């Protein structure tokens, strides 16, 4: 399909978008460096919170790309390139994780030989929880994600020029291979970076919890970008508000799915009432954390559920923009809730400060800079995709 047939005309985003992203990135980096110099322990936990959130956006976006290929979805083709752009953060994980490797002694109690020497349970888990194996498996996971990203995105961009349908067939095979690898590796990431901060606690559903949140926030950034770009003429004029419905429906579905997984994890451990299981939730119900826990139920589930419940909300651009921003903020609160309570339980003093704001600023700036850079270099719509015309014909 040619550009004339699709109605798509490539154009750059307003210059101030890139400038805002660059300013946020620079300010965030400066504040983050000051944070590490003045309070390395607080900086380590705040950085981990931002890093997990950053992974959720990038890896969740890559999952959405593979999900479209594997499922043979048609309606989402005009939006797939947006998810590809957000997935462009994946190659940077191997670099951004380095500060965390140097902060492991602050993050993890199992790094303390004195603590391990007095605990037979931790001694038994040191076969898995040891620094060399930890660094090797994390690096391997990030390299695997990078490889799949490079292969999938390279084929997608080549298709813009060649319109070769064989490239779609290749990406379908890659996507089918990636999805189980994604499920396994995101579980390992959740176990290593978050669950092991409470090393005697375990939950077999924890990986699914992170998967639900990452897909949810990836859908939110996709919906926010797709609606703003389409309504301002950056996508094809053949993209209709009917296309928004499926985005809204998926956000609604993952709102419910996250709530189900979160409740199932809590309910089973509450019912079992085993000391090694309930300790995780006790940490999040002492001091001021109980208010964050209660707020999470309202912010992460009740509000987006009620907003997205009516069918009319799923095709209303203003409502979709609002709820997408809400979901992005809610997911950051969830990442914060997953990480920060363990700071106190690992022996450090914690109170909310400017340090907790510096890293989200840097993440927001990096996401904007990367997205703006991708828009300059590549088409916002996969013009060579053989399903593109059928996607334009989609209607409710």
Image (cartoon, rainbow, N blue to C red):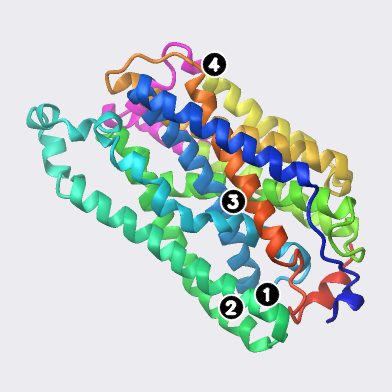
Q: CA distance from mark 4 to mark 2?
A: 45 Å
- Residue 64, quarter of the rendered image: bottom right
Q: Earlier in the sequence, mark 3 or mark 2?
A: 2
Q: Secondary structure at mark 3?
A: helix
Is residue 267 highlighted in magenta?
yes
User: Where residue 372 sits in the image (x, y, percent)?
Assistant: 69, 52
Q: Which mark is residue 215?
A: 3
Q: Which mark is residue 239?
A: none
Q: Residues within 10 Å of mark 3 (few under 14, many from 20)?
A: many
Are discs 1 and 2 less than 8 Å apart at CB?
A: yes
Q: Magenta segment, which residues?
A: 263-291
- Residue 349, quarter of the rendered image: top left
Q: CA distance from mark 1 to mark 3?
A: 18 Å
Q: Residue furthest top?
A: 287
Q: Which mark is residue 72?
A: 1
Residue at numbered disc 4: 291
């Amino acid at each position: 399909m040619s550009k004339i047939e699709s109605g798509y005309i490539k154009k750059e985003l307003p210059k101030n978008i890139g400038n805002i992203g660059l300013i946020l990135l620079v300010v965030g980096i400066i504040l983050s460096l000051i944070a590490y110099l003045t309070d390395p322990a607080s900086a380590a936990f705040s950085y981990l919170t931002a890093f997990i959130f950053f992974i959720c956006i990038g890896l969740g976006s890559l999952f959405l790309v593979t999900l479209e290929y594997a499922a043979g979805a048609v309606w989402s083709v005009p939006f797939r390139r947006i998810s590809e752009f957000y997935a462009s953060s994946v190659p940077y994980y191997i670099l951004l994780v380095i500060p965390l490797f140097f902060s492991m002694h602050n993050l993890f109690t199992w790094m303390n030989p004195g603590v391990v020497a007095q605990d037979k349970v931790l001694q038994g888990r040191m076969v898995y929880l040891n620094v060399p194996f930890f660094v090797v498996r994390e690096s391997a996971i990030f390299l695997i994600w990078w490889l799949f990203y490079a292969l999938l995105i390279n084929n997608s961009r080549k298709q813009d020029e060649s319109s070769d349908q064989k490239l779609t067939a290749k990406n379908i095979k890659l996507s089918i291979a990636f999805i189980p690898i994604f499920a396994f590796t995101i579980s390992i990431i959740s176990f290593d970076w978050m669950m092991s901060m409470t090393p005697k606690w375990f939950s077999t559903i924890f990986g699914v919890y992170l998967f639900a949140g990452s897909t949810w926030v990836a859908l939110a950034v996709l919906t926010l970008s797709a609606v703003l770009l389409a309504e301002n003429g950056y996508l094809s004029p053949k993209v209709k508000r009917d296309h928004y419905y499926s985005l809204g429906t998926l956000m609604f579905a993952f709102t419910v799915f996250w709530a189900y997984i979160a409740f199932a994890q809590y309910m089973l451990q509450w019912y079992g009432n085993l000391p090694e299981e309930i300790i995780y939730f006790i940490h999040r119900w002492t001091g001021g954390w109980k208010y964050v826990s209660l707020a999470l139920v309202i912010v992460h589930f009740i509000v987006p559920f009620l907003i997205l419940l009516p069918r009319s909300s799923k095709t209303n651009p203003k409502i979709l923009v609002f709820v997408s921003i809400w979901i992005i903020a809610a997911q950051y609160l969830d990442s914060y809730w997953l990480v920060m309570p363990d700071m106190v339980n690992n022996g450090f003093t914690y109170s909310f400060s400017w340090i907790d704001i510096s890293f989200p600023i840097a993440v927001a700036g990096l996401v904007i800079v990367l997205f703006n850079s991708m828009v300059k270099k590549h088409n916002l719509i996969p013009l060579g995709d053989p399903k593109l015309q059928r996607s334009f014909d989609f209607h409710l």
